[in-house]
Amino acid sequence: MDIEREILETDILIVGAGPAGLAVAHKLMQLVEADGDMEVPEILVMEKGSHVGAHALSGAVMDPKGLKELIPDFVEKEAPLEAEVKSDAMYYLSESGSMKFPFTPPSINNHGNYIVSLNKLSAWLGEQVEATGLDIFAGLAGYDLIIENGRVEGVQTVDMGLNKEGEPRSNFEPGSIVKAKLTILCEGVHGSLTRHAYERIPELLADALPQSYLTGVKEVWKVPEGRIKAGDVIHTIGWPQPSHEYGGGWVYGMSDTMVSIGYAVGLNSPDPTNDPHMKFQRYKCHPLMREILKGGEMLHYGAKTIPDAGYYSMPKLYHQGLLLCGDSAGMLNPAKLKGIHLAIKSGIMAAETAFDCLKADDFSADRLKAYADRFDTSWAKDELYKYRNFHQGFDGGLLPGLFHAGIQMVTGGRGLFDRRRHERDHKYMMTIEQYQKRFGKKPEKHTVKLDNEFTHDKLTDVYKSGTMHEEEQPSHLVIADYDICNNRCTEEYGNPCQHFCPAHVYEMVDDDERPGKIKLQLTPSNCVHCKTCDIADPYQVIRWVTPQGGEGPNYENC
């Protein structure tokens, strides 16, 4: 289908209005204003969510270091800080009991940090950016990365008003071509344009180890007073994760009556029935969690993936016409499970580099290399390098992981090995036959009764996420080969997509055309944009692409 597209031109294109993208925009405008002589450049900030913060989800305990560098008077400007951390606790859980650690490991010591709602913080940062005179274009989603002669030239936005077959409807609006001297990708975890960059610019990942991910599932609860105090932070390891798998949970006191509770599950699990959502529901049933939540009400839900492999899995940060920031660049501390401060710092460094490029009117790779140089001499690099082998230390399970974490503390992050190689997460998933040979039984998911009062099914949680998609549009979950899903995957893995998706997008139903057989049924309108399917599918035939702009979850207080 030949489509005539509007071409928009800008100097700087920022894709994603999360902490990283907003930090780029804010810092760049600060630098332009301080310069005095520079004409204000054209800067376009695009955000696929319906509003700034709609797709922002995190735990979240924030190290204020990055925000303090960007906006030193953030407290006076009434940044939405739910509570300053007052206490830390770490527990090891068994199925019915718990053991409190006698000390808090340094990596999760949160003294001086703040409990925040990332969607509220992002909205506030958006207001600070708009106060500089910049507009943020919410509901504008990038579909394709434009690369010409090896240089990133900009982005094509999503076509609006297509039917399920991809044909134009009466309200069809073709996506635009946004051409930029510099495109800065701040899409968050496993962004679709960032994936285009990795696939079409091989040098970006040439020296990087594969990224590893967890899926974090979270609910916000209103609870009776006396259960928790504002600023209380609890982290847990152990149950319900098997000892050979990676993951853990948290409880954060957002106020005396508001609790953020969640569970993060490694996607390198050998178990084809690995279900982060179900593990989270079981987690809430633990006596320690039940004591906090009982008599309360679940208000909000969300799920997202977390890039957790650390320093050695970071890509090259620049290319001709391109910079990568925040989670798009894998800037997350795997030991602390914190990335907001690193995202903001990356945005600051990207803005400083973009400013220098504007002054010189030079956006070549040689000039953009200054971004990587800034990173190499920053506290962000020091922090990430200190925990460069943390995730890999848990490859053998929980107990070896704790041992390696201790050795890494003594050796400055090296441990007994440095830069240990690992595979992409989906390669660790075992077939039913392989699993039975290793563990002596077929994979069987542990479940708990879902009453939709204390424990919740996926559809109820999706409703609580505020997720909305127009039904009449092409699926943004593209299946390359349904024959694999309906036949080979059923036999070999038992269709793990129906388990690992935390939003009931994938369902195996009876196939009327093949009595006794099942087929995959997709419900893309349930998708909360976590990207788990794109990462964990053992055949890699599922690809997440952007739906129409403004669609997806609408997180509140998350």
Image (cartoon, rainbow, N blue to C red):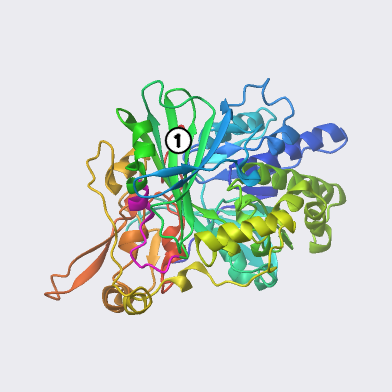
Q: Is disc 1 surrounded by few (<14), some (14 to 19) or many (20+) residues within 10 Å? A: many
Q: Amino acid at mark 1?
A: Ser
**On screen, 211 above or below 233?**
below
Residue 555 seen anywhere in this rendered image of the structure:
no
Left or right: residue 190 compared with residue 446:
right
| Disc 1, SS | strand
Quarter where residue 506 is shown? bottom left
Whole-percent x, y for residue 382 in the image: 76, 52
User: Residue at (28%, 37%) from the top-left corner?
Assistant: 454
Query: Of residues 14 and 160, which is closer to you in this image?
Result: 14
Query: Of residues 302 and 16, which is closer to you in this image?
Result: 302
Quarter where residue 524 is shown? bottom left
Left or right: residue 254 compared with residue 322:
left
Q: Which quarter shows the N terminus? A: bottom left
User: Residue at (73%, 56%) from the top-left corner?
Assistant: 410
Whole-percent x, y for residue 55 in the image: 48, 43
Q: Which residues fall within the magenta stretch? A: 269-280
- Which residue bears the numbered disc 1? 260
Whole-percent x, y for residue 263 in the image: 44, 47
